[in-house]
Image: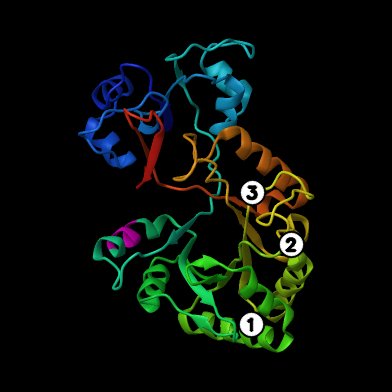
Amino acid sequence: MIQIVTVRSGDSVYSLASKYGSTPDEIVKDNGLNPAETLVVGQALIVNTKGNNFYVQPGDSLYRISQTYNVPLASLAKVNNLSLKSILHVGQQLYIPKGTKRAVESIAYLQPSTIPIKESLVNATRAINPFLTYLAYFSFEAKRDGTLKEPTETAKIANIATQGNTIPMLVITNIENGNFSADLTSVILRDATIQNKFITNILQTAEKYGMRDIHFDFESVAPEDREAYNRFLRNVKTRLPNGYTLSTTLVPKTSSNQKGKFFEAHDYKAQGQIVDFVVIMTYDWGWQGGPPMAISPIGPVKEVLQYAKSQMPPQKIMMGTKFIRIRLETSVQTRKPTSKSS
């Protein structure tokens, strides 16, 4: 059984493997760890325990565990000879009855940093592909004349996706000269001729590579272009052939009137009505240029998802996460932390 284990003081890969009936090699492999590095207190690890055994973690309750594993609360309590109000203790072993498996949809964003694409990245993509619903190749960049700048080796990546019955996504961004551009977006949203040409090129490219989801990651859109962006998405949706879906990326918001150039043009309610699904960027609270903190702190993430559910059907929401780590280094002289991402 897969469970999330929080590292405590004195824990090591070897002690966790012994405690949970796993192996050090399995924990290292499942979590992409460097065996030479020590674990950090508070670090969350995936551990594959024996059988249906579950070990209580800090903050766990019968209700929370029943929700996680989709098992009726009464059944969980009964099989472990507990009352519904029993207080659990960290490290306590429970038996988890077999529950109903949830259907899960997943997306992996692929963003090569070299031309040609490194073979190691291609191999990693092939390895995870069978477990994905969508493979998003980042990115096709919009141009001011309504054309698209393609990423390298698009056909290779699209073929990897389709060979594994994964849906390749056509990811379109408003990146210009390495940055998300409000000016570029305004040109496309405000000029009907360029916009029609842009949509035509998108549909032709999607057909060429067999990409059945059209995915817009338009960021830093000018606040005054909020309604124009909504109209543009409606235009794209109207022109989609049968069998195609439309999706967008949204910045994390907690209210409809949240101020700031990064937030105002992303209309949760309207996009929830227009598109088939959204991917919310529930990450980057902690980032390379900021103070030490979690990349996706649970409190703010919950607030964003609660607001999103109030604006659109929950089945349209996909939560984003980043598989990176930030290593904090403290200067002895300045005592100020610096960070590096990897």
Classify the position of the N terminus by image quarter: top left
Element class at badge 3: loop
Q: Nearer the viewer, residue 266 or 33?
A: 266
**Circle 3 crowding by C-alpha within 10 Å: few under 14, some 14–19, many from 20:** many
Query: Residue beneath label 2, please?
Result: 223
Magenta region: 123-127
Marked residue nearer the N-terminal end (3 or 2): 2
Query: Residue beneath label 3, please?
Result: 252
Horizontal placement of 296 versus 257: left or right? left
Chief secondary structure of the magenta portion: helix
Q: Tell me where residue 305 appears, x and y as whole percent.
A: 66, 43
Q: Tell me where residue 235 appears, x and y as whole percent.
A: 73, 78
Disc number at residue 199?
A: 1
Amino acid type, label 2: Pro
Element class at badge 2: helix
Distance Cα–Cα, label 1 vs label 3: 26 Å
Distance Cα–Cα, label 3 vs label 2: 15 Å
- For the residues labelled 2 and 1, say whether their Cβ atoms are less than 8 Å apart: no
Q: Is residue 259 above or below residue 228?
A: above
Q: Residue at x 44, y 13 (%)?
A: 92
Tell which residue pokes out farthest to the front in this image: 333
Q: Residue at x 79, y 67 (%)?
A: 227
Horizontal placement of 30 versus 229: left or right? left
Q: Is residue 270 above or below residue 15?
A: below
